[in-house]
Amino acid sequence: MQAMLLTIVLAPLVGAIIAGLFARQVGRAGAHWATIIGVAISAALSLVVFKQQVFDGAPVWNESVYTWMVIGGFTFEIGFLVDRLTAMMMVVVTSVSLMVHIYTIGYMRDEAHNWPKNSRAGRHAYQRFFAYISLFTFSMLMLVMANNFLQLFFGWEAVGLVSYLLIGFWLNRDTAVYANLKAFLVNRVGDFGFLLGIGMILFYFNTLDYASVFAAAERIDGLSIALFPGFEWSVITVICILLFIGAMGKSAQVPLHVWLPDSMEGPTPISALIHAATMVTAGIFMVARMSPLFEFSTAALSFILVIGAITALFMGFLGLVQNDIKRVVAYSTLSQLGYMTVALGVSAYAAGVFHLMTHAFFKALLFLAAGSVIIAMHHEQDMRKMGGLKKYLPITYWTSLIGTLALIGAPFFSGFFSKDAIIMAVGESTLSAAGFAYIAVLLGVFVTALYSFRLFFLVFHGKERMDEQTRSHLHESPAVVTVPLILLAIPSVLIGLPLVGSMAFGDFFAGAITVLPHNDVLGRLAQEYTGVIGMVIHGLVTPPVWLAAAGVVTAWYLYLHRPELPERIRQRFAGLHAFMVNKYGFDDFNEKVFAGGSRRLGDLLWRHGDVRVIDGWLVNGTANTVGRLAQLARRLQSGYLYHYAFAMVLGLLLMLILFTTGRG
Amino acid sequence: MLENYLPILIFMAVGLIMGAVVMAIGYLLGPQRPDSEKGSAYECGFEAFEDARMKFDVRYYLVAILFIIFDLEIAFLFPWAVVLGEIGLFALGAMAIFLLILVVGFIYEWKKGALEWE
Amino acid sequence: MNLPGTQDYLAALPEIVVATLACIVLLIDLWSNDRERLLTWLATQFTLLVGIVLIIVQLSTDVTYAFAGTYVKDILSDVLKLFIFIGAGVAFLYMREYLRIHNEMKGEYFTLGLFAVLGMMVLASASHMITLYLGLELLSLSLYALVAMRRDSAQSAEAAMKYFMLGAIASGMLLYGMSMIYGATGSLDLREVADAVAQARSDDLILIFGLVFIVAGIAFKLGAVPFHMWAPDVYQGAPTAVTLFLATVPKLAAFAMLMRLLVDGLGPLHDQWQGMLIILAVLSMAIGNLVAIAQENIRRMLAYSTISHVGFLLLGVLSGTDQGYAAALFYTVVYMIMGLGAFGVLVMLGRAGFEADRLSDIKGLNQRSPWLAGVMLVMMFSMAGVPPFLGFWAKFAVLQEVVAVGLVWLAVAAVVFSIIGAFYYLRIVKLIYFDEAEEQAPIRGSSPMRVMVSSNGLVVLLFGLFPAPLLGICIAVFTRIELVIG
């Protein structure tokens, strides 16, 4: 078992090393074969692990494989915790990753013309790309399979690093470099909270091992800490909120969401793999994994719920005003992450993770389909210059339709089950913020349907708005692109049906996720759960499905039936539109207050603190002093033998005097 | 245990003091008017031929050093010979090994030409 | 009269075999006409290999005293010898490359090296002051001769002379200290000394007197301030091939001396020698790091860097705990690896008749050979104690143990000095990467050399990422020793 788990983790790493360090030797084909084989091994073995865990009832595997170091009584280890939650994540990560690897062959086929001639950055960029995405797979597996916080943090930072590298993959484009810097900085804010949380866990629990921490969670319940004099906080609430701040960064929750739309500067396969399917869900996964802690803090859960609800609704709105095809999907991702977070907030962790899984498949599908469109359009991403692509890209069209239907939650599609489970759970919750959240997620359904079909109609239907030259070159993408689309479309449709009963409402995650009885909304729902058909019928008499349908109809009316109408609406509500195009001013606010403020502060500190005190006095002062001392001490080394001997004898005498006087 | 050595210590101290006192008296009472004649090395009544620090041929040192090794070996053989009867075969073997190692060294210096004067 | 039996010979089998083979290597070299001395070199490496095999076959945590208690084979001696063999093997490889580059191939480099190794082995296994002294002298004499190998170079001769004279003084001090201890305890057997010392009054003047002299003798071997004066001159004066050997592997032997004399023999006097080692350690770290800054010669700089590393090593020993000793052993081994790597790079930079050892010689190394520059970068970062390289863990382990025994101020001082020290390591990195090359000669090097230097760098990097195995060995050595003795 240990060998197998190690293989799963290390196979992508080996692939990454081959493709990354031996780029010249293996060439392009060697690079993609090495990485694809590595990830394929991982994916196959992950399926085996999944089968063992889920169908054969194998016991939870929780062992350390290597002791990294022992410091001051703390043992830091590398180990794996494999239960059903992990197994599911492993399958999602490796299978989506495998699809993306294959797809990349097609997408990156002629990346060379994206680089300036003879640029060093462009050399072996193809291999570099494969190395990165394999490295990402390795990091993500380390993250989900961790059995302690340190390894979790390693994976957490490693995926962040790869994400940074990939957003800035076109490193000669200013926008890409700006976007990756932004992603990095925003994630720093989240990671800071995360690290503080881990630090507090180490402080209060004296261990970083999951099992020990969870076992001791009850002991910590009731302790409090004074963050400011006079304000007592429950320790567990502080820990949970800090950890969740980490999740907010990685899973792009308001207000740390600003990096995700910009991250679309990265190549599309990356948007699918990292910024839709896997990395951004790391925060969701982490909170679900930490459910034994979060359960003890209603305050933290309410905080999560509010943040999630805001993200789910307001990020959806922004999808309505975007014209870049990838950005629309990106905002849809933000909104769906909000849904998952809402589920976590009402303790419906299972539903959240279930949505994470279905979302991974259909969102990867949507991104790859968008990528396919972009390839066909010769890297044109503006939807206003598309339209009527249905007849040129049939496979892309149908797979996109499947993905979109899954996204808006059409009955029987995977997204329907997971999203409905979340909405029902919110309706069932007794948290005080649940009312607001319920309205937000309901409205969100309508908005989701509206922007999804807006995109769909603008791209595939209506007038062909592209220029003549592009139109003449339009053709369906190659098999390496379409096959992953088809392979991803299958789970997008089907994966909800067989799993909803056990995953969302059953005891699939028993043991992996802990829910206290008074929070157990899914348990209450499960009593009414009567199977898949029952859920669909129930769905037909509740608002979400009808709201979604209304969204589709509205989209049809606005963008196909009366295409001139949106423009009129835009002009009527110009102020609101501008506000939304500016993304509610988050970027401006950050730019002015945080970036500008810290620049001014930095300037101040630099002028007065750094140049005068530190440079002038501390650094140069010390350096000069040290230099003078060094020259002085150097004189001692005269080169004369008798000086040396004298020094020895002198040293001996001094020691003798020091240690013998006053004793005998 | 160290008390036994007290007489020796006294003896040494007295010796030191005597020497020092005699030299000090000579230094304090005698007239000191050095000139170049008085300061030069005394060589049996006539002018000094050369510097007292004279150069030896480096080969002399080499042979002297090589000699010391075998000289010490002999010094080691005497006590060994005295107790050979008591220790018996073991001592014989030990000394054989010792000599063997020396022989290796000897072969080395011979082969390297360290024994040839020219 | 108890004559030595089979188990005595078995316990000392590695020494016996190495001594025999060393003699044979000497003879082989006499009759070899090969200008390249390939056979001598191979025989030397074979000897080390046989030594490694013998050690591994007999590896155990049992403590065996042999030859009437003058000799001990325990896990510490086994592990030390293993590291000595490995270090010496690498050093000889670098040495051969150097001698080939400079057309100075002589078999004596290797035979003397082997005898030095033998001396170190005896030191590592000594449980009697006479044995210890014997090992020390065998080691020292071989090293004196090695330093003087380049007879016609005034610099080498001067270095050898200084080394020899000062070494003789230090040996005298050590012997004098031993005789004091003998006077106070009536024995030279370190176990009996320990028993007698434990019963003696702790303020016994003669004991303290002897202790000071012994500490001075060891400090000379280690090159701790103020007994360090020989190091810079010798490092600079000796051929680099000799310097790299002399600067690295014998430190393990010096560590063995510390363990055997101070811990095994004079352990009960810990309170006293802790104070002395603190002085030595602080002075070494201060002088070593400060003066290194003012050096223009890399070998001289490395000599001062060694002095400062010795200060760190002493920190681990002076803590007086098993974990501290383990940390010190770890530090010594790590230092040996880093030192070998750094000197290995210097060897590769040189060419016939030219030692690349001025700071200006490594300017712009990155342009000439990015790979070699990378190895040097790893070594320098590691020596400076930058994570995640091996040197960081060594410093960390030592500092942790110093803090554990409550000497926080000492740890703070050590950190301050190592920050000062980081300056000159980073200066090397700066010269390598950011300066224009003055020297344009291409860098060659045989493939074994390239492989070895690369692996040396990789080891520092990999063990830096995964320090547990190496550290684990060092800890195991001392925890088991305690089990057996206690």
Image (cartoon, rainbow, N blue to C red):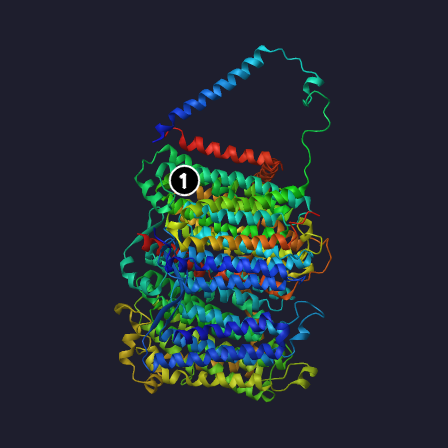
The x, y position of residue C459, in whole percent, is 53, 61
Residue drawn at x 52%, y 55% as measured from the top left: B100
Disc 1: CA contacts within 10 A as few (<14), some (14-19) or many (>=20): many
- The image shows residue B42, relative to residue A62, as above or below, that is above
Q: Can you say which quadrant of the picture contains the N terminus of chain A?
A: bottom left
**Is residue A52 depicted above or below A618 in this figure?**
below
- Left or right of A265 on screen, residue A143: left
Q: Secondary structure at mark 1?
A: helix
Rendered position, A16 above or below C2: below
Instruction: Name the residue beneath numbered marker 1.
Output: C273
Q: Position of residue C128 (x, y in %)?
A: 40, 47
| Residue type, numbered disc 1 | Trp
Q: Which of the 4 image quadrants contains residue A58?
A: bottom left
Q: Position of residue B13 (x, y in %)?
A: 45, 22
| Residue C394 in the image, given as x and y percentages of width and height | 47, 53
Q: Which chain letter matches label 1?
A: C
Is residue A568 among the parts visible in the rendering?
no
Q: Residue at x 33, y 71 (%)?
A: A513
Q: Quadrant of residue A17?
A: bottom right
Q: How many marks?
A: 1
Q: Would you say residue A513 is visible in this rendering?
A: yes
